[in-house]
Image (cartoon, grey):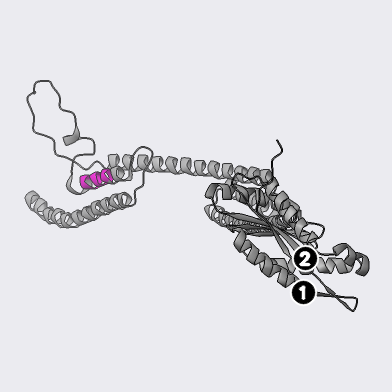
Amino acid sequence: MFWRKKTEQEPVAAAAAPTAAPELDTAVEGAASILRALGKHAFAVGDESAETITQRLEQWASHLLVLAPLPGRGAGSKVSSLPPRPTTPPAPVKRDWQAVVRFVEAHRKAEHAHVSSTTSSMRETIVTMLHCFRATSVGQGHTDAQIRGQLDALHEAVESGSVEALRGRARAVAAAITDALETQRERSTAQTMELRERLGHLQQQLDDAQRAGVTDPLTQLGNRRQFDTFIERAALLASVTGQPMSLLIFDIDHFKMINDTYGHPAGDAILRTVADALARSFPRRSDIVVRYGGEEFAVVLTETAMKDAQRLATRCLDAIRESEVSHGGRTISVTASAGLAELLPGESVADLVTRADRALYDAKHTGRDRLSSASLPIAKVA
């Protein structure tokens, strides 16, 4: 009866075995899947890279699935240099569930410490950034109340530790700073344009002042100052290049009598008429026409010999003669006399002006309304 009783119990044990193995396999596979999931989404912790952590988690998963050696043991262990001892059959490898739990717990603690440290460093960085924003804003003198309020709110979000609050406040601060920078850019652009306009007006005023300094206000021709500067440069250039240069001096005939008879307004009108005739007769930009003084005008003709200058001067005298000035219901006829001199080799500007002036004197005293040319150099007194 005893052996029959034992035989009746054997089928019970045999029936329990098939159900225990699948449950264990499922648990092992589930635990390995969890370890592999942790490895798939691993990130660097301290000095360990994400790749190293992933490999280690895979080793623990292999240990559970195929009873591979525990990480850090087996093939990776150090080899002893002592002589080999008598060996005994190796003990069968068992799943070390406690070691797996200890590793996962230690790894999660390391992750927690790493995240806490990183979060703390980030908060310190944000706080430092806030102080820098405030200091920069105050230092540049354009602190904006809205930005200050957003910075204070961001500081509170940092202290609260809420990621959502921190994200929202960070966006608000970024938007406020962007708006402030855009406003500052627009203000700077407007200020730059205003400054540019002011500089343009100032440059215009300087140009006007410079022109006024060398321009006769009545006739709008150059004045004696411009004449002196121009003729010195033209004479020097002529001496270097060997090109001819001529000087004409015009004087309005009977101008004092016109002023005494018709008055100074009539005299001013005649001066403007003669200036216009001279400007139209000598239009080259390389030449210059100036009011030399009183009723006298001077013309410097560069690269022009006496023969060509005589032709141009005669044409100009004709134009002046044909001009008539109406004033006070009366018509005033105008004529002028002219003296011409060509620059001689080695001659100074002062001597050239003296010879042209003497030629003008000859024209005035030989009948007026004519041209007289100087051909001889000034005699030097011993």
Q: Amino acid type of disc 2?
A: Ala
Q: Amino acid type of disc 1?
A: Ser
Residues tagged 1 and 2 counted as in contact (Cβ below 8 A): no
Q: Name the side, left or right, on which 35 lies relative to 138.
A: left
Residue 115, picture quadrant: top left
Question: What residue do we see at 70% from left, 51% from top?
Answer: 355
Q: Position of residue 233 (x, y in %)?
A: 62, 49
Q: Position of residue 235 (x, y in %)?
A: 62, 49
Q: Earlier in the sequence, mark 1 or mark 2?
A: 1
Residue 323, picture quadrant: bottom right
Q: Name the side, left or right, on which 252 lies relative to 166.
A: right
- Viewer-nearest residue: 210 or 107: 210
> What is the span of residues highlighted in magenta in the rendered image?
55-63
Q: Is residue 61 magenta?
A: yes
Q: Is residue 343 magenta?
A: no
Residue identifier under label 1? 323
238 versus 310 height, above or below: above
Q: Position of residue 216 (x, y in %)?
A: 77, 59
Disc number placed over residue 336 in the picture, else none:
2
